[in-house]
Amino acid sequence: MRTLKKSIILACLGILLASPVTAAESGAGKIEIVKGVTVSGLVEVEGSYADTEDGSSTDLSLATFELDLDAKVTDWLSARAVLLYEEDGDDELIVDEAYIRMKKEDMPFFAEAGRMTQAFGNFATGMISDPLTLELGETKHHATLRVGFEADPLTASVAVMKGDVQKIGTDDINTIVASISAAGEVNESIRYGLGASYISNISDTDGLQDSYDSSFGETSDFVGGYSIYGIAGFGSFEFRAEYLAAAGEFSDGDIAGLKPQAYNVEIGYDLPLPMHFALRYAGAEDFGAKEQYGATLAYDLAEQATVALEYLHQKNDDLAKSDMVTLQLAMEF
């Protein structure tokens, strides 16, 4: 596995170094390294101070390194690969996504096959920290077959994947993910986005998988989950809200008898200077923080580079409280 990771890294670096003459801008944040192949990426460095009932602590980390490769072979066939490193996540370079997409530009239907993040939840945020809805509902690192429909302003899809949490005694493709959303602009000042999604096995999200470690990733019955969200923009203001929850109580695992749910509400404002302000109020039941609120102020150092400062207060189910201040330097390329 380590040899494979090193080979992937060396191959990507080899492409970048071997093609300096042909490199050219190809849309915001993307560089064409050879004909039909573009590369883009993200680097986020974070320093933080946390004050909890057990004391205070500080940290400095490479929060995110992401390298995206997109290749278009024909007018209907393309591929995408994403290499990802998160120091507070897997703490190793992984293939986060790698899939083939089939869609003609003049046709609304598409199909995708490979490893991809599932279309469950929206998770839009103007803050540095991830919303609680993402911590509960994000699913990734699964091989998936997805088919759907795209025609402005509507997007709809259905996907199947083999989750890590299985019914007792089985080893099958066992999870369906369905989503529908709409996004667009009413005029130059008013924009919108809204959608809903469903997963037939919410226990297989990154936030809930560990609850089944003691039972070797097996359950007697699947519990579904759903998400609804809305985004409304009015000039420099943007309002975001999402609710994500299990459809019923779990019958086994460490979360037996619980019905996890989370919500996130944010207001964002673009200041006249190249600055952005965001406020958050969020919470959860039977999962993570019971209540969370905070604010982020970000300043654009350049078109694709930002420095941001965030304050976040959190109260957990056991009523323990914490306060965290995070400074982030981020750059897209």
Image (cartoon, grey):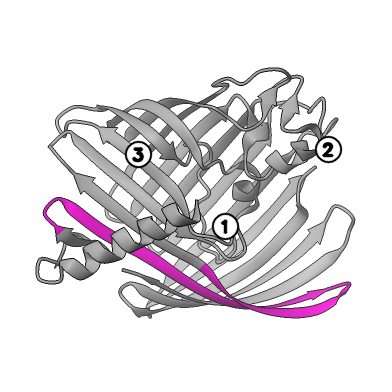
Residue 194 higher or lower than 2, as above or below = above
Direction from residue 76 to residue 173 in the image, left or right: right
Q: Eyeballing the image, is 267 above or below 283?
A: below
Q: Which of 116 and 171 lies nearest the eye of the viewer?
A: 171
Residue drawn at point x = 59 percent, y = 48 percent: 134
Q: CA distance from mark 1 to mark 3?
A: 32 Å
Q: Secondary structure at mark 1?
A: strand
Q: Earlier in the sequence, mark 1 or mark 3?
A: 3
> In the image, 188: left or right of 170?
left
Q: Is residue 223 visible?
A: no
Q: Earlier in the sequence, mark 3 or mark 2?
A: 3
Q: Is residue 300 left or right of residue 94?
A: left
CB atoms at circles 3 and 2 under 8 Å apart? Answer: no
Question: Would you place residue 251 above or below residue 39 in this image?
Answer: above
Alpha carbon separation for disc pair 1 and 2? 31 Å
Quadrant hosting residue 234 = bottom left
Residue extending farthest to the front is: 3
From the image, state whether disc 1 or disc 3 is nearer to you.
3
Q: Residue at x 49, y 59 (%)?
A: 93
Horizontal side, residue 158 vs residue 309: left or right: left
In the rendered view of the protein, which quadrant contains the C terminus?
Answer: bottom left
Q: Earlier in the sequence, mark 1 or mark 2?
A: 2
Question: Which residue type carries mark 3?
Answer: Tyr
Label 2 neighbour load within 10 Å: few <14, some 14-19, many 20+: some
Pinpoint residue 257: horizontal percent, then vertical percent: 85, 30
Residue toward you, 163 or 197: 163
| Residue type pointed to by label 2 | Asp
The range drawn in magenta is: 34-63
Magenta segment's dominant SS is strand
